[in-house]
Amino acid sequence: MNFSVIDGVFTITLDLVSTTAVAAILLMFGYWCIRNVKFFEKYCFPAPVIGGFAFALLTWLLHGTGLAAFKLDTTLQSPFMLAFFTTIGLGGSLALLKTGGRALIVYLVACWCLAVFQNVIGVGLAKGMGLHPLMGVMAGAVSMEGGHGAAAAFGPEAEAMGAVGAATVAIACATFGLIAGNMTGGPLARFIIEKKKIEIKTDDT
C-alpha cells in the first residue's frame, strides 16, 4: 500500500495483498452487519453485497468530493471469479434439476424472454443515445443476467469489436443489478412468503 497525489487527488494504491485484505475485511464487516442489524438478516442481504456496497459508497463519496481515490490490484479478480462460478456449476446435477420440476422450466423460459427484452431495450436505447449497439448488449442480458462473470468475460471482446469502454459499462451495470436485486429481491420474497403463508422446508424439517 502506498499513498500519492495523482492529478491533484490524494490516491491510495493497494497492492495485491492489501486489496485481498480489504476484501476480506469487507466480507467480515458484512457478516457483522447481518448478526447485529436485524434489517439485513430479516431481508436476506448477502454479506458480500453489504461489504461491497459500503466500500462502493465510501469510494463514491471520497471521489465525488475530491478528497481521495482508490486504486486496486485486480490480478486475482478473474481467477477468483472463475473458481466461484466453477464451484457453483459443480453443485448442479440432474437430480437437483428434477426436483425443480415445472417451476424450474417456467423460470428458465422467463429468463430467456427477459434476456431478449433486456438486449432489445438496451440496443434501442444505445442507438437512441448515439452509442455503439454493443453497449446496449453489455448493459442488457450480459451484465443483468450474466453478472460480473459474463461482464468481465465479454467486456474485452466487445471493446475489441469497437465498443470503447464496454468492459467498464458491463461491470458497472452488473454491480448496479446485483445491488438493486438484493435490495428488492429479499424484501419482496419475504413479503410473498408471509402473505401466502408459504411453508419453507429444509433438510432439518
Image (cartoon, helix red, strand yellow):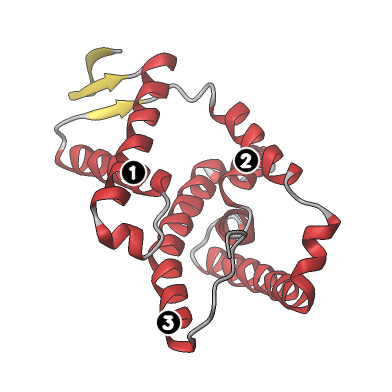
Question: Is residue 15 in view?
Answer: no
Marks 2 and 1 sit apart, C-alpha to C-alpha, by 34 Å
Separation of disc 1 and disc 3 at Cα? 25 Å
On the picture, is 117 further left or further right than 7? Answer: right
Residue found farthest to the front: 205
Circle 3: element type: helix
Q: In front: mark 3 or mark 2?
A: 3
**Amino acid found under the numbered disc labelled 1:** Gly
Q: Is residue 148 above or below residue 127?
A: above
Q: Residues within 10 Å of mark 3 (few under 14, many from 20)?
A: few
What residue does disc 3 label?
Answer: 194
Does label 3 or label 2 sit earlier along the sequence?
2
Q: Nearer the viewer, mark 2 or mark 1?
A: 1
Residue 20 can be seen, yes or no: yes
Using the image, determine if residue 37 lies above or below residue 30: below
Image quadrant containing the C terminus: bottom right
The residue at the point 55 percent across, 57 percent down is 139
The disc, 2 or 1, on the residue closer to the chain's N-terminal end is: 1
Write down the quadrant of residue 61 in the picture.
Answer: top left
Specify whether 200 is left or right of 30: right
Q: Disc 3 residue type?
A: Glu
Identify the residue position indicated by label 2 in the image.
159
Asked if labels 3 and 1 touch by Cβ distance under 8 angstroms, the answer is no
* Amino acid tagged 2: Glu
**Measured from the top left, where is residue 141 in percent x and y?**
63, 61
> Which residue is painted at 25% across and 30% down in the image?
69
The residue that mark 1 highlights is 30
Farthest residue to the top: give it: 2
Q: Where 53 sits versus 181, above or below?
A: above
